[in-house]
Amino acid sequence: MEKRSARLAAARTSRVVRDELMALILERGLAPGELLPTEFELVEDLGVSRNSVREALKALQALDIVEIRHGHGTYVGRLSLNPLADGLAFRTLQRIGRDARAVSELLETREALEDGLIRRVAASIPDVDLEALETVTAAMEAKAGSGEDFAEEDRQFHELLYRSLDNQIVVQLLRAFWDVFHRVNDRLGGEDPDLPETARRHRAILAALRARDVDGAQRAMTEHFRNIDARVALLEARGLGPAPA
């Protein structure tokens, strides 16, 4: 009982120190890449043990809030959504053997996000972004014609779609959902059953954008996700079966 109480007290202390470190970063206006006070200074400022500071910094590093560079100090991290992607990927892989909707839930969330965003950009996407999308779509079509996967071009296409919004949270959320889907896909040995059709769906989205057709762009995006549904069904069938070697 005493050992359990000690562990709980240590956990509470770690959470408190972690919160105080985040407050310090905010109060001092430290930006990503900027140096935090030394470990000794943090111990003095917060009035806690060196071990408590170290444990709290490790927890914040896991969240990409700080970056510990051994021999150089501790810096404010990139503040990315990578920890979210890691957690979602593990959660999906852990559930997929028992829950047939594990991957579908990810896709539904991403579709809800993109369904709204495509209407935001369809009427006003800059010509420079349309040309960048044309280059990526042409690369998809060329690879599809030779039976080559184009996952990287797929990621680029969806990031370019919303570049004009200048919203880093949107970019990072989409990247997180994309990364999770493809991690699960790679883990389960999935592949696109119809590369030319997937490329065609991207071409349809671009055609609607070129026409400044808001409703058409949304319909094309919805049709694109119905194409992905077939891949998800295959992934979930693999996940519910024997684990891949």
Image (tube, grey):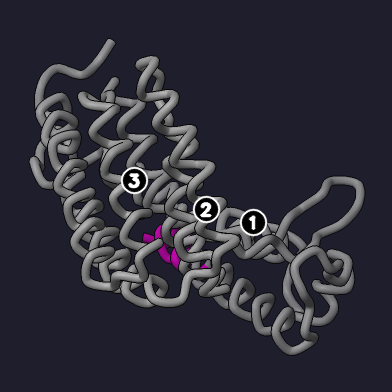
Q: Main secondary structure of the magenta part?
A: helix
Would residue 142 be found to the left or right of residue 14 on screen? left
Q: Are marks 1 and 3 in contact (CB under 8 Å)?
A: no
Work out whether mark 2 precedes mark 1 in sequence or the reverse, and give the earlier one: 1
Q: Residue furthest front?
A: 211
Please identify the quadrant where the N terminus is shown. Answer: bottom left
Which residue in the structure is indicated by mark 3?
Answer: 203
Question: What element does badge 2 sit on?
Answer: helix
Q: Quadrant of residue 215?
A: bottom left
Residue 176, percent across and down? 44, 53
Q: Quadrant of residue 20?
A: bottom right
Which residue in the structure is indicated by mark 2?
Answer: 82
Amino acid type, label 3: Arg
Front position in the image: 96 or 105: 105
Would residue 8 be found to the left or right of residue 73 on screen? left
Amino acid type, label 1: Gln
Q: Residues within 10 Å of mark 2 (few under 14, many from 20)?
A: some
Please identify the quadrant where the C terminus is shown. Answer: top left
